[in-house]
Amino acid sequence: MSLKSVVFAAAAAAAIATSAFAGDAMIMVHDQYARVSSPTAKAGAAFMEIINKGEAGDQLIDVRSDVAAKVQLHTHKEGGDGVMKMMHVEEGFAVPAGETHVLQRGGDHIMFMGLKQALNHGDVVKLTLVFEKAGEVEIEVPVDLERKAEGHGGHSN
């Protein structure tokens, strides 16, 4: 294996799984990706698995990125009229000890509003996830415009 292959493999592994430790919380992020609906879209979303390997629950309470004017934690909920609507989740998402919280299409996700640049296939978005206990976790999220709506451990997303 060439040095170039080894360096690339190490970088890819680092991008795929990121960990943070704080007290009894140990947060890992896996299988992250971002997408937009079209090259001229002003909004986009990011999806991932957040794994808490620790002995205490944690809460994802905020997310930040320079890629958009506003970045929020969102979910889909059915309105009184039967129509699914996206909404900001101010309290964030619980990640219980020993469990995984999946951010997926049609469910909980990270929303980019007012994109400052186009998100093209293969680009990388830098995100800071903010947890109550684990603190800030900086990750790199590849833009994957070809990914199908299946994945994350068999969940539809």
Image: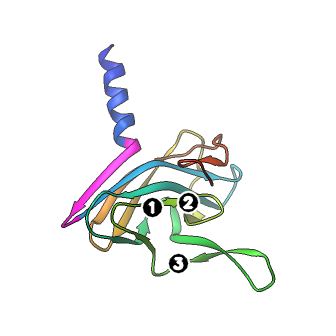
Q: Amino acid at mark 3?
A: Val
Residue lying at the far left of the rendered structure: 23
Mark 3 against mark 2, which lies toward the viewer? 3
Q: Which badge, 3 or 1, is on the more N-terminal residue?
A: 1
Expressed as whole percent of the image width and height from the top left, the position of residue 88 reads 56, 77
Q: Is the stretch drawn in magenta largely helix, strand or loop?
A: strand
Q: Determine whether 146 is above or below 54 in the image.
A: above
Q: Position of residue 95 (x, y in %)?
A: 40, 67
| Label 1 residue SS | loop
Q: Secondary structure at mark 3?
A: loop
Nearer the N terminus, badge 3 or badge 2?
3
Residue occupying the point 45% across, 61% down: 66
Image quarter in which the C terminus is found: bottom right
Disc 1 + disc 2, Cβ < 8 Å: yes
Q: Residues within 10 Å of mark 1 (few under 14, many from 20)?
A: some
Q: Which residue is depicted at the point 52% across and 68% down?
A: 69
The magenta span reads: 15-24
Marks 1 and 2 sit apart, C-alpha to C-alpha, by 8 Å
Q: Which residue is mark 2?
A: 116
Q: Which mark is residue 66?
A: 1
User: Which residue lies under the disc numbered 3?
Assistant: 89
- The outermost residue toward the top is 1
Q: Earlier in the sequence, mark 1 or mark 2?
A: 1
The span from disc 3 to disc 1 (Cα, nearest Å) is 20 Å
